[in-house]
């Protein structure tokens, strides 16, 4: 779905090449540059909510009604496009931005400790135009605290002392702030990484603690599998590893660590690796534990690949940790 006419990060693959001695790196690097065109996905699926899922929508429907109290036709709310932050420009052609569009919930994609992800269809009534979005909704004061949030929040500053105290005390107000802070941090990081050409979903918009993201999956609404669900053959395993290394180098070069990278927050769609779940994205310079998170990301994913038979040379931690440190500018 990307619209880059040229890859702004050609140099990241040149940098990648200097860390490997394989003769076939050039074709593999070219495969890592692949980008999907807008006409590859034209979501058309329209589904129904279960009774339980409709109950979950009740609290959101107050903002969806018109002035005369009528819900949009065949939908659960009107488009929220003009209600919050919008994704990087130019917006992809597949994304529907008209205010007359309608959002319809199609079901739950994933539930988690910090957020739930729903499948949402945005469509223009009376036309065949529609797109699928992943609606990620962070939980706030009535749910459990974010796991391990203290380390990730280091280096993020609140402008007001009252907000800082509320977060430190974990009051209801403070937990709400944490939820929105994490949503804002993920949205900002996704926008920046998308502009850099990193393999992440396009962040369409953010309203409060809800993110609407590019849906990674089939036009019929089938979500792409997580890396942890796959049993790749040796060639695919090596190709996915090379894609992952290039992505980690790109993040490090621009001062980021994923912070919680594992085979469970990597999707594989049409042989393309996609990084997801970045609320805990770490500024490796501002966060005093930045290097620790960077190295842990590598250790987590390399262990998964090693368990599936990737060779020792490709997994050499000393070489790759040194490369990540160099990209992040953290070498002594």
Image (cartoon, grey):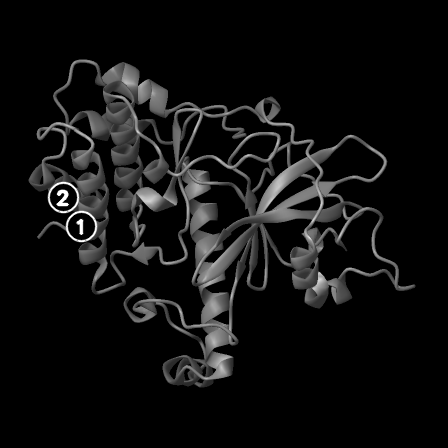
Q: x%, y% of residue 17?
A: 20, 25
Residue holding disc 2: 321
Is 235 positioned to the left or the right of 114 in the image?
Answer: left
Q: How crowded is mark 1: few (under 14 residues within 10 Å), some or many (20 or more)?
A: some
The residue lying at 12 percent from left, 27 percent from top is 311
- Give above or below for 141 relative to 129: below
Q: Is residue 244 left or right of residue 306?
A: right
Q: Total number of numbered labels? A: 2
Residue 37 occupies quadrant: top right
Residue 14 lies left or right of residue 71; in this view the side is left
Position of residue 146 relative to residue 280, above or below, is below
Which numbered marker is on residue 295?
A: 1
Q: Nearer the viewer, residue 75 or 25?
A: 75
SS of the residue at dot 2? helix
Above/below status of 246 relative to 186: above
The residue lying at 71 percent from left, 45 percent from top is: 48
Q: Tell me which residue sits at (14%, 43%) in the image.
A: 321
Direction right: furthest residue: 68
The 10 Å Cα crowd at callout 2, few under 14, some 14 to 19, many 20 or more, is some
Q: Is residue 283 left or right of residue 327?
A: right
Disc number at residue 149? none
Residue at 52% x, 33% y is 217
Mark 2–mark 1 distance (CA, rounded to whole Å): 6 Å
Work out which quarter of the rendered image holds the N terminus and state it. Answer: top right
Residue 46: x percent and y percent? 71, 38
Q: What element carries label 1?
A: helix
Query: As rendered, which of 178 and 307 lies closer to the eye?
Result: 307
Q: Where is residue 76 in the image (x, y as percent from the top left)?
A: 75, 53
First in sequence, mark 2 or 1: give its number.
1
Give the x, y percent position of residue 154. Answer: 30, 69
Check whether the beta carbons of the residues at disc 2 and disc 1 lie within 8 A of each other: yes
């Amino acid at each position: 779905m990307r619209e880059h006419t040229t890859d702004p990060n050609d140099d990241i693959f040149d940098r990648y090449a200097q860390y490997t001695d394989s003769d076939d790196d050039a074709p593999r690097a070219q495969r890592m540059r692949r980008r999907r065109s807008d006409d590859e996905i034209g979501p058309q699926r329209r589904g129904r909510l279960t009774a339980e899922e409709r109950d979950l929508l009740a609290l959101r429907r107050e903002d969806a009604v018109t002035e005369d109290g009528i819900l949009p036709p065949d939908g659960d709310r009107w488009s929220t496009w003009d209600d919050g932050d919008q994704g990087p420009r130019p917006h992809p052609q597949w994304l529907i931005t008209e205010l007359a569009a309608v959002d319809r919930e199609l079901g739950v994609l994933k539930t988690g400790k910090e957020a739930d992800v729903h499948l949402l269809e945005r469509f223009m009534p009376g036309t065949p135009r529609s797109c699928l979005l992943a609606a990620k909704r962070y939980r706030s004061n009535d749910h459990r605290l974010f796991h391990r949030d203290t380390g990730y929040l280091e280096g993020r500053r609140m402008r007001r002392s009252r907000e800082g105290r509320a977060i430190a005390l974990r009051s209801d107000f403070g937990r709400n702030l944490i939820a929105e802070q994490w949503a804002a941090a993920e949205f900002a990081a996704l926008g920046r990484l998308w502009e850099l050409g990193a393999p992440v979903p396009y962040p369409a918009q953010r309203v409060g603690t809800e993110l609407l993201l590019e849906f990674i999956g089939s036009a019929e609404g089938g979500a792409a599998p997580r890396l942890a669900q796959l049993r790749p053959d040796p060639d695919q395993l090596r190709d996915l590893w090379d894609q992952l290394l290039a992505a980690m180098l790109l993040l490090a070069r621009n001062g980021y660590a994923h912070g919680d990278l594992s085979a469970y927050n990597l999707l594989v769609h049409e042989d393309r690796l996609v990084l997801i779940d970045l609320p805990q994205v770490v500024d490796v310079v501002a966060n005093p534990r930045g290097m620790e998170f960077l190295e842990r990301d590598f250790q987590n994913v390399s262990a998964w690949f090693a368990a599936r038979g990737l060779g020792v040379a490709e997994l050499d931690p000393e070489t790759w940790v040194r490369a990540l440190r160099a990209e992040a500018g953290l070498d002594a």
